[in-house]
C-alpha cells in the first residue's frame, strides 16, 4: 500500500495502536481505542441505519449545536456585553469584519434551525414510541435538552441590545415576576415576604429593569452556563442511547 510508510511509522503507531485491516478484531479495537470513533458502537444493526426511521433529526440537532458553538466563539472575539458597546459591536461585526454579516446570520439561522429540529426530533421519538422502556430516562434527559435549547434562544435574544431585544426581554422577564410564591406580582407573594428587590425577576435581571446587569447575566448564561449544561446533557443522552441497546428500530 502506498501510505504504508505513514501507517507503519512510529509516530502514527504512537497515536493509532491497531491496524486498519479487514480482521474483525482489529477493526473493533481500532474503533474502541479511538476517542472520536468510540462514540459509535462497534456493531450496528442494518435497520438502525434506516434514515426513514429517525430522519437523523437528533444528529442534525447536534450539528446545529456545534455550528452555534463555533460561530458563537468567533462572535465573542468582537462583542462586549456592556450597554455602551453591545449594539455598536453588533453593527461593527456586520459591517467592518470580513464575513461578519455571514457569521452573525449563520449563528442566528442555526439557532432557529436547532429549535425546529429539536422539536421535530422530539415528535419523531414520540410518534415511533421510542420513549417507552428502556428509553424513558433518555426522554427525560431530552426534556432537559429542549429546555436548554429554548433558554439559549431566550438569553441570546437580549445580546444584540436593540429595541426588539430590550422590550422582548422586558416582557419575557415579567413572567418571572408572576412566579407563584417567588414573584413580586405572582400569587401568594406575601407568604415569603417577596418584593421587587428579592424576587425571581430580580434574580434573573440583577436589577428590577432590563439594563447593564441583565445584559451581563444573560451573556454569562448564554455563553458559559447553558452551553456547558447542554454539552453535559448531550454526553449523557448519547451515552444512554448506547446503554439502552442503540437507537430503537422498526418492529
Ligand atoms: C439538543 C437536543 C438533542 C440532541 C442533540 C439529540 C440527539 C439525539 C440523537 C443523535 C439521537 C439518535 C437518534 C436520532 O438521531 O434520532 C437521539 C435519540 C433520542 N432522543 Fe434525542 N436529542 C436532543 C433532544 C431530545 C429531546 C427534546 C427529546 C425528547 C424530549 C429526546 C429524546 C430522545 C430519545 C428518547 C432518543 C432514543 C430514540 C430511539 O432510540 O429511537 N432528544 N437524540
Image (spheres, grey):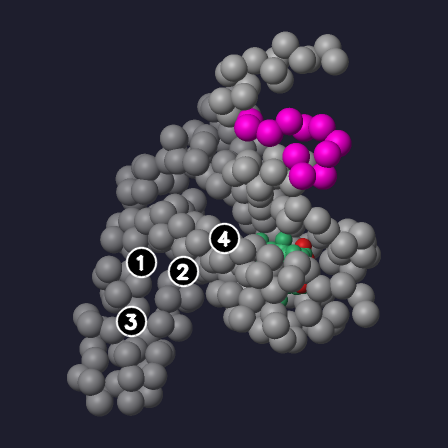
**Tag 2 and tag 3, C-beta contact below 8 Å:** no
Write down the residue under mark 3.
200
Packing grade of label 3 (10 A; few <14, some 14-19, many >=20) is: many
Ligand 1 lies in which image quarter? bottom right
* Extent of the magenta region: 16-26
Query: In the rendering, at what x and y percent does residue 28 appear?
Result: 65, 40
Write down the residue under mark 1.
210
Q: Nearer the viewer, residue 80 or 132?
A: 132
| Distance Cα–Cα, label 2 vs label 1 | 7 Å
* Mark 4 / mark 3, whichever is N-terminal: 3
Q: Is residue 63 magenta?
A: no
Number of numbered callouts drawn: 4
Q: Is residue 173 left or right of residue 103?
A: left
| Distance Cα–Cα, label 4 vs label 1 | 34 Å
| Distance Cα–Cα, label 4 vs label 3 | 30 Å
Q: SS at mark 2?
A: helix
Write down the residue under mark 2.
169
**Tag 2 and tag 1, C-beta contact below 8 Å:** yes
**Tag 4 and tag 3, C-beta contact below 8 Å:** no
- Residue for point 61% across, 35% down: 30
Write down the residue under mark 4.
235
Query: In the rendering, at what x and y percent does residue 215 appear?
Result: 32, 50
Query: In the rendering, at what x and y percent does residue 65 appear?
Result: 54, 47
Q: SS at mark 1?
A: loop
- Residue for point 56% across, 66% down: 138
Q: Is residue 230 visible?
A: no
Q: Locate residue 92: give its quadrant.
A: top left
Amino acid at each position: 500500500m502506498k501510505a504504508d510508510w505513514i501507517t507503519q511509522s512510529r509516530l502514527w503507531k504512537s497515536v493509532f495502536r491497531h491496524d486498519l485491516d479487514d480482521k474483525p478484531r482489529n477493526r473493533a479495537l481500532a474503533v474502541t481505542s479511538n476517542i472520536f470513533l468510540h462514540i459509535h458502537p462497534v456493531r450496528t444493526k442494518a435497520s438502525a441505519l434506516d434514515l426513514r426511521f429517525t430522519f437523523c433529526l437528533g444528529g442534525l440537532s447536534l450539528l446545529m449545536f456545534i455550528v452555534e458553538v463555533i460561530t458563537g466563539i468567533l462572535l465573542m472575539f468582537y462583542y462586549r456585553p456592556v450597554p455602551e458597546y453591545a449594539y455598536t459591536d453588533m453593527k461593527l461585526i456586520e459591517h467592518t469584519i470580513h464575513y461578519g454579516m455571514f457569521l452573525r446570520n449563520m449563528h442566528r439561522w442555526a439557532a432557529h434551525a436547532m429549535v425546529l429540529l429539536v422539536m421535530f426530533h422530539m415528535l419523531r421519538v414520540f410518534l415511533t414510541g421510542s420513549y417507552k422502556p428502556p428509553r424513558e430516562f433518555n426522554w427525560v434527559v431530552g426534556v432537559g435538552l429542549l429546555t436548554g435549547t429554548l433558554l439559549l434562544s431566550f438569553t441570546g435574544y437580549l445580546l444584540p441590545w436593540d429595541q426588539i431585544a430590550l422590550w422582548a426581554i422586558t416582557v419575557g422577564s415579567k413572567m418571572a415576576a408572576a412566579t407563584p410564591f417567588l414573584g413580586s406580582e405572582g400569587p401568594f407573594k406575601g407568604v415569603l415576604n417577596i418584593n421587587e428587590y428579592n424576587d425571581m425577576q430580580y434574580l434573573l435581571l440583577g436589577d428590577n429593569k432590563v439594563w447593564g446587569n441583565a445584559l451581563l447575566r444573560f451573556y454569562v448564561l448564554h455563553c458559559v452556563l447553558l452551553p456547558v449544561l447542554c454539552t453535559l446533557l448531550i454526553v449523557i443522552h448519547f451515552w444512554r442511547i448506547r446503554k439502552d441497546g442503540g437507537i430503537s428500530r422498526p418492529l
